[in-house]
Amino acid sequence: MIKAPLFLVLKGMAMGMAEVVPGVSGGTIAFITGIYERLINVIKSIGPGLFTAFKKDGIPGVWKAVDGNFLVTLISGMVVGIVIGVFLITHLLETYPLLVWSYFFGLIMVSAWFVGKQIIQVNGQVIFMATLGACIAYYITVAVPVAGNPELWYVFVCGAIAVSALLLPGISGSFILLLLGMYTYIIPTVKDAIKTFEIDKIIVLIAFGSGMLVGMIAFSRVISWAFANFKDLTLAALTGFLIGSLNKIWPWQKILQTMEKDSGELVIIHSRSVLPATFAKIELNPIYGNDPQILGCVLLIAAGFATVFVAEQLSSKLSSE
């Protein structure tokens, strides 16, 4: 039997690997594996209250306040997952994009059911919130990227919005940066800041990081408050987000706009979901090609379904022990 700490490491690894995939959120994995609310509460604990905990009980008080054992174990797994994702998942996406997206499509589809089934009372308000969440997420997936802005205030805002998206199941922070027109500015700037330590690049990095910190602390409080006071409505909205985001990870995409990195790698900026029959007729479709691979995709969608059910069963067993 897998011990609880090791299982938490595996959950962190899954979250880390998900964050490498543009269009898939680590928040989704956190929800599937049953640690979402605990993670939100940990992030929420980061603030002025830590100074009070330190003054009262020292470092042990701070460690308890931030749920240190949980946080360190989870982050350790996430770091390993990100490393694996950078080398393995990105390679698979480049080599077998339809099959990889099919797996995530099945994963997210059944996750929507998994989150939705936790709603205790279904009424008009719940249905409205689910519909609203789905519409917002769907609009995000079809929105055309806007022009970016290198002003520091905009960089700060983008950091806050991107990290808030990371905390929402179904919404990818990297995809939000693409929509805000800042992906091609932020990522190279961050890399240059780390490599060259140029002051102007470091200032941009500080502005973006500050926005992420503020956004993470503020948004975690909003989510925590929503769960405490309107749990069914919050679950409905998150279910809607997952359903609406399915358009982004639908396996059969017609590529409309790409971006070439300095390394020569093509990155998809904008695409449109199409039926497999339409996909097969596309003459020029960078990265994806035009072979629908229907059997393989169906099998990987089923594998995504199975993954969630297995994770749920393991989580339930560990919780009961």
Image: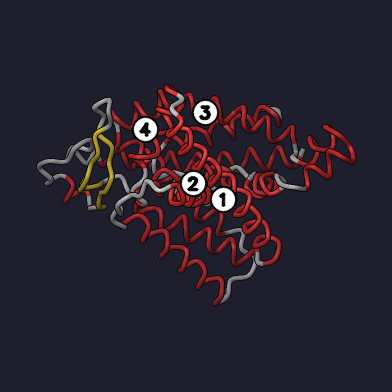
Residue at the left extreme of this rendering? 283
Quadrant holding the C terminus: top right
Q: CA distance from mark 4 to mark 1?
A: 22 Å
Disc number for residue 188: 4
Q: Secondary structure at mark 2?
A: helix
Task: Return the disc, 3 or 1, that comes first in the chain's sequence.
Answer: 3
Of circles 3 and 1, the one toward us is 1
Choose top left, top right, bottom left or bottom right for residue 32. Answer: top right
Of circles 3 and 2, the one toward us is 2
Q: Secondary structure at mark 1?
A: helix
Image position, residue 75 (x, y; %): 62, 31
Residue identifier under label 1: 215
Image position, residue 30 (x, y; %): 58, 43
Residue identifier under label 3: 81
Residue identifier under label 2: 159
Q: CA distance from mark 2 to mark 1?
A: 7 Å
Please tell me which residue is depicted at 20% across the width and 48% down the height of the picture: 256
Q: Amino acid at mark 1?
A: Gly
State whether residue 109 appears in this view: no
Q: Amino acid at mark 3?
A: Gly
Q: CA distance from mark 3 to mark 1?
A: 24 Å
CB contact under 8 Å: marks 2 and 1 = yes
Please tell me which residue is depicted at 30% across the width and 44% down the height of the picture: 251
Left or right of 139 in this view: 65 = right
